[in-house]
Image: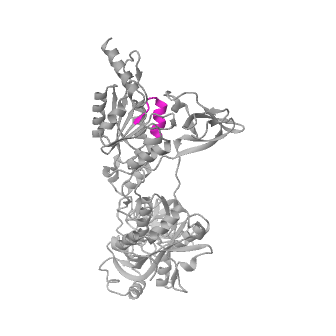
Amino acid sequence: MSETEAAFADRLAGAARQEQFLRVVSREDAIARFRAAVPHVALGAERVPLADALGRVLARDVASPIDVPPFDRALVDGFALRAADTEGAGAASPRALTLNREILACGVAPSLVVAPGTATPIATGGVVPRGADAVIMVEQTEFDAEAGSVAVLQAVRPGQFIGYAGADMASGETVLRRGMPVTAREIGMLAACGVGSVEVVRRPRVAVLSTGDELAAAGEALRPGAIYDSNGPIVAASVTENGGAALPLGFVRDDEHALATALRGAMAVGDLVVLSGGTSKGAGDVSHRILQRLGAPGILVHGVALKPGKPLCLALADGVPIVVLPGFPTSAMFTFHDIVVPLIRAMAGLPPREETSVTATVPQRVASEQGRTEFVMTSLSETEEGLVALPLPKGSGSVTAFSQADGFFAVPAARSGLEAGETVSVTRLGAGVRPPDLTIIGSHCVGLDRVVGRLAEAGFRARTLWVGSAGGLAALGRGECDLAAMHLLDPETGTYNRPFLAPGMALAPGWGRLQGLVHRPGDPRFEGRSIGEAVRAALADSETVMVNRNTGSGTRALVDGLLAGARPPGFFNQPRSHNAVAAAVAQGRADWGVAIATVGRSYGLGFLPLADERYDFAYQSAQSARPALAAFLALLRDPETHRALAEAGFTPGDAA
């Protein structure tokens, strides 16, 4: 007997003696054991350059370090002017304005104020100069070079063709949240904020090995009795598809010492080791014996009631998870996607893979082995009666089954098959789009970023849209959102928010915050004065420019009360956020406005207190048990949330 024949005979004898499957368990039991032993949680953070962030998952919330845009800018080519100077203008009654002697191209800082009766040429993206509250398109004017003037042929409204500072992203506003995958869209947002690097979840390093004396590498000549290794490349590609960093280590022969050495090397470099082959009953099956010696606790599961996929082996050795997939390609890929992909995605910080499903009928009886959950690869066919699921005849040894299939359906373990005409749910081989769990519309507050961030940690995704308090309340009434964020004062009762609720709505207490007049430090028109004195002084000086807020916002109601019907310069400059107000004052485009104290401090502005107000949340009472809404309401009461809000300068909880 040759040496090779003797070795083969020894392996046959060993296979006859081995206890092949320690204990076959159900799929559910196997997953439960694996999850109990191996934490399915995100790995630590690492900072990467923006260029390398594509496809990664954010490990921290990202707040914009600047306002975007960083100044009020023109949205068209034309002339910056005062809207009041264009009243009554038309083709038959043009209004002539004297041109200021500067042209505001992109990147040019204005040096001249737009006084009444004047206008300044401005390019798209140019900085809107002080005094101007609108931009008129060049097509709606006639230029008179000789007179140095421009004829306005159409009246414009205040704010027309102006993009206000912070209208896109406000300084300090959380623009991207922890757990969010970075796509080209997020790259653009980060670049617009000037963020050059971000903290992302570290990709799990997945060492990929194949076993078998019969394996050959792609590109090599195929010797007699050999097959090309397809499991290694497809597993490595699937690791990358699901957010991991694949470490392809090739294949190793069916030798116990060689395999043990290879596995120890894989454990040294990988957060997870995936081995294919060496789990089912056969002469080369040595991996299960090696796993018991690599470290505690060893094998967790060896044998699962799956078809295909029964020989699956799950282990944990010295903190490193090891998964031994069946050798047949389809068996390997089913078990990989079912068991391993959830772990890789969790370690990478990604949400569970979401597959789309369609309903179809099976045209013929599908036999199955009772006691094992069976996944059936299928192609879909459109008929006059609807979709038909056609089971693919190729078995677990087929490499092409996945590429030819449109999806798969399951035959429950309790059944021996499906009858012709039965309806099945076919899982498509593609990811679905996950809608947000909670939609919040209304008035923005940086404090809300703290709560939404904690909500994300609890596994709920929120979408936030800022349209003002009244707009949010209207959206709630129309059923367009789950929560309306608001701070509306009822002047008759002196009560915030509750008087504005419609029948069926409830109010969740948010927090208190301080509104006040913001100004540049050292400005004698405001410094050291009471707010009443400061406003009177500002209204008496025609050179003092204010910045207002948009109609429907809670802050606008406070401003209107201060002005008592006056319309001072800057009245029609009406941005939608506290940050835009503070930016206008800080940059000298306006001299005063009303904003919350936390925003004023972040811009280094002086602050005169005006009113303690309530920032609360309205919701439909009938929806309070919805999981995401219930989680948000619980967070509002949570002591940790209160601590975070207090640190940010807010007064959490209900009004005293």
Closer to the camera in the image, 636 or 281? 281
Residue 511 falls in which quadrant of the image?
bottom left
Residue 598 in picture, x, y percent from top left? 37, 73
Q: Is residue 272 left or right of residue 361?
A: left
When the figure is inspected, residue 91 is found, relative to residue 37, above or below; the finding is below
Residue 148 is inside the magenta segment:
no
Closer to the camera in the image, 38 or 223? 38
Tell me the quarter of the image containing the C terminus: bottom left
Residue 391 in picture, x, y percent from top left? 60, 32
How is the model colour-coded? one colour
Tell me the quarter of the image containing the N terminus: top left
Residue at 49 percent of width and 60 percent of height: 463
Which residue range is magenta in the image? 324-337
Magenta part mainly helix, strand or loop?
helix
When the figure is inspected, residue 548 is found, relative to residue 68, above or below; the finding is below
Residue 335 is inside the magenta segment:
yes
